[in-house]
Amino acid sequence: MNPAPNLVLVGPMGAGKSSIGRRMAERFGLDFVDADAFIEQRTGASISAIFDHVGEAGFRERESSALEELLAGSGQLVATGGGAVLLESNRRLMRGRGFVVYLRADIDSQLKRLSRDRTRPLLQRGDREQVLRDLAAFREPLYREVADLVMDTDGLTAAEAASRLALRLAETWTISEAAA
C-alpha cells in the first residue's frame, strides 16, 4: 500500500478526470474538487477568459496556487487540468500530498470525447488532432513521472473506468492517517 492524504488524477483533456473522479470520490468518501472549476470560482473568470487576459503563463501561476491550497488539505479527490504536470513544483506537490493516478487516453478517444467541446483554450488553435498529438508528445513523460498508477480509459464509460480503477486502488492505495 502507498498511503497518501489525497487522491490526484492527472492526464490529458478528455481522459475522464472529472467524470471518473466524481464517481471515485463518492465511492471512497472523498471530497471531489475539479481544479479548473476551483480556479474559476476563486478568480470569478472562466479558464478561457484567464487565458485571454493573462495568457497560459498567467493561468499556470493561478493553477499552481490552487494546487498548493487544495493539496494542503486531505480527504480529497483532486481532478487536475491537463497541464498541471508542466511545472516541477506541481509534480513534487502532487507526489508529496497525493496518490497520483494517470488516466491515459489515446488521441482518437480524446477527439471523440471532446468533439463538441468549445471551451478549452488549447483546442481553439488550428487542427485539434495535431494539437492533441503535440500536447501528448510533451506531457506523456510528465504524467508517467508523477504517477503512482496508470489507468487506460480508452473504450470505457466513466462508470466502467471508475469500477476498474476502484479495484486497482483497493490493492495499491490507502488514505493516510493525516486525512482521517
Image: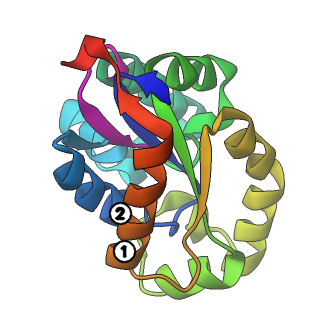
In this rendering, position of residue 8 left or right of residue 75:
right
Q: Between marks 2 and 1, how big is the CA–CA gap? A: 5 Å
Residue 53 visible in the displayed image: no
Give yes or no for contact between labels 2 and 1 (Cβ–Cβ under 8 Å): yes
Q: Quadrant of the C terminus?
A: top left
Range of magenta residues: 71-80
Q: Position of residue 142 (x, y in %)?
A: 74, 39
Rendering colour mode = rainbow
Chain-order first, disc 2 or disc 1:
2
Q: Position of residue 108 (x, y in %)?
A: 67, 85
**Relative height, residue 26 to residue 180 (above, below):** below
Dot 1 crowding, Cα within 10 Å, few <14, some 14–19, many 20+: many
Q: Which residue is pictured at 59% across the width and 44% down the height?
A: 83
Q: Position of residue 49 (x, y in %)?
A: 37, 49
Callout 2: SS: helix
Q: Which residue is pictured at 48% across the width and 32% down the height?
A: 99
- What's the residue type where badge 1 is placed? Ala
In this rendering, position of residue 153 left or right of residue 24:
right
Residue 8 visible in the displayed image: yes
Residue 155 image-quadrant placement = bottom right
Callout 1: SS: helix
Q: Which residue is mark 2?
A: 20
Q: Position of residue 174 (x, y in %)?
A: 38, 31
Q: Which residue is mark 1?
A: 158
Q: Which residue is pictured at 40% across the width and 17% down the height?
A: 68
Dot 2 crowding, Cα within 10 Å, few <14, some 14–19, many 20+: many
**Relative height, residue 140 to residue 147 (above, below):** below
Q: Nearer the viewer, residue 14 or 148?
A: 148
- What's the residue type where badge 2 is placed? Ile
Tally of numbered discs: 2
Q: Nearer the viewer, residue 158 or 3?
A: 3
